[in-house]
Image: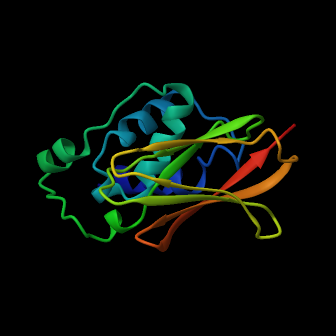
Amino acid sequence: MWRFENLKMKINEKFHPIQNQSSISLGERQEIEVFATQCPYKGGRAVIKARFYVHLFNDSIVYFDDEVCLSQGIERLRHDELNSTVDFMLTPNPANEQVEVRILNHITDIVKIQLINPLGEILFENENKIGVNNCIINTKKYPSGFYQVKLYRNGEDSHTEKLILIK
């Protein structure tokens, strides 16, 4: 149990690939890959962050959370605390001409996606239909800088990520 909590803490603090450009050993990378396969209802956002990190090296991995969680004795409920937010990943980030917004959890609701500039102006807005888990935002016409990508689920602010545009 200590090893699990230690790795969870390490991922939450050290392995944010955009904010902290620290290098990691092959052994630590393998630990993160194993951690990414855990049930996200047990490991929380640390599992999602681990999956994001793994995605930087291998974007073809598919996680079967329902089966993994059930095998660990965790039955997922529709409106539990972890399922109330929409976790997503921006690739590439930093971006140049376009960025893909990839929703990581299974969503059965309509999700609104917004791109917001530093002045708070909405530059892009799209509503994804039920079952659509990604959206491409064309960023060619926006200058270099820091932006926010916000997702709304059921009309409520669900999650926000930073986007860096480099021209």
Q: Is 99 placed above or below 129 here?
A: above
- Residue 20 vs 156, above or below: the answer is above
Residue 126 shown left or right of residue 92 in the figure: left
The one of 96 and 4 positioned closer to us in this rendering: 96
Residue at 44% x, 30% y: name it.
30
List x then y, in percent, for residue 101: 55, 45
Which colour assignment does the render follow? rainbow
Q: Quadrant of the C terminus?
A: top right
On the rendered structure, is 92 left or right of 152? right
Answer with the quarter of the image where residue 126 lies. bottom right
Q: Where is 20 relative to 121, above or below?
A: above
Look at 16% across and 57% down and name the residue there: 74
- Residue 44, horizontal then vertical, whole percent: 38, 59
Query: Is 157 or 27 nearer to us in this picture?
Result: 157
Q: Is residue 69 left or right of residue 57?
A: left
The residue positioned 34% from the left and 32% from the top of the image is: 62
The structure residue drawn at horizontal position 69% and vertical position 36%, both measured from the top left corner, is: 98
- Percent across and percent down for residue 157 are 52, 72
Q: How many labels does the image show?
A: 0
Residue 106 lies, in percent from the top left, at 32, 50
Q: On the rendered image, what quadrant is the N terminus found in?
A: bottom left
Instruction: Look at the picture and state if 166 lies above or below 73.
Output: above
